Each structure stands twice: as C-alpha cells, then as structure tokens.
Image (cartoon, rainbow, N blue to C red):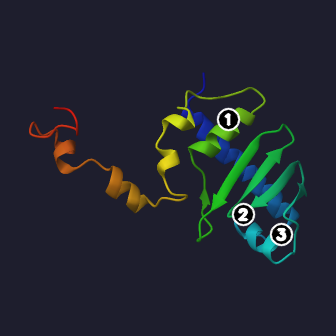
Amino acid sequence: MATARDLVIGYVDALSSAGEAMRAAFPSLERLADVLGLVRSHRISRSGEIGTYSYSVHGAGCLFINQEGSEIDVDFAADGAEIFDLWRLRLYGQSLPELVLYGLTSIERTAYPRFKRLITAHELHVFFAPMREEAAGSPNWAPPGAG
C-alpha cells in the first residue's frame, strides 16, 4: 500500500506535468497561475484541450484531467503560488486508474469543512500550535474536558 506521502508526490508531479503542457501550448505563461489572466483577458477559453490534458478554469484555480482520467485540481494564491489541500489530494487519489485512498481520513471527519477557503500559515500556527504548557508536557495542564 502506498503512503499519503506518495499521494502528495504523485499529485505534485502530475501538476508539474500539466504545467509543462500549459507552458508548451501558451509560451507566454510564466507561472501556471497566469492562466487566470489569460482567461480573464479572453486570450484563451475557460476550458479546452492542451496536449494530453483537458483544462477548466474555475474561480481562483484550474482543474486538469489527463488522458488516463486523473484529476489535478489546483487553486492559486494572490502571489501565484499553487495551493492544494486534503480535498484536492483525495479527488486526485480517487481519480487514479487504480483507486488510491492512501488511508486518508474522510473529509467529513476532518477539520477542513470548518476552515475558511484559505488559511495562512500564521493562522495555523496561532490557532493550532500547542501552548507552551502542552508542548512542555506540564503536569498542571490537561486538555479541556479531561477532568
């Protein structure tokens, strides 16, 4: 059985391949996120075929589907960074020719539905990093509801 790490590496490799196909089709594309600008300026259509991929631009991202049917969905941050999350990894794993779930928790059992659309690294640290007492294993500290 493959690991979650394998799933992430597979997703990143697939996204890189889709990016290469987009840059081959649209040489002016410096970053994959620039596809949003091309669509908004009507220089390319919102969906289409490029090489062995179909693409569909949505909101702040793009869904790529390769010839095997694998789905690579990505969002773009304001600075052009490529963003993916557990939902997108799961979508990718489920779309592989051989269903691959990699032991990932179902989306309904995660905190993801409670997050706003994008959460910053700072917010993750502030809200989910252990307090000093937790990290130090203080005998005076107990999780809420533990006693």
Q: CA distance from mark 3 to mark 2?
A: 11 Å
Q: Is residue 118 visible?
A: yes
**Three-letter code, disc 2:** Leu
Which residue is identified by label 1? 93
Q: Residue at x 63, y 38 (%)?
A: 90
Q: Would you place residue 144 above or below residue 59 in this image?
A: above
Answer with the quarter of the image where residue 146 lies.
top left
Q: State which quarter of the image contains the N terminus.
A: top right
Q: Residue at x 67, y 54 (%)?
A: 74
Q: CA distance from mark 1 to mark 2?
A: 22 Å
**Three-letter code, disc 3:** Pro
Q: Which mark is residue 105?
A: none
Q: Residue at x 82, y 38 (%)?
A: 69
- Residue 43 pos. (x, y %): 87, 75
Q: Nearer the viewer, residue 121 or 147?
A: 147
- Mark 1 Cα shell of 10 Å, populated few (<14), some (14-19), many (≥20): many
Of labels 3 and 2, the one closer to you: 2
- Mark 3 in CB contact with mark 2 (< 8 angstroms): no
Which residue is identified by label 2? 32
Which residue is identified by label 3? 27
Q: Would you place residue 17 above or below residue 33 in this image?
A: above
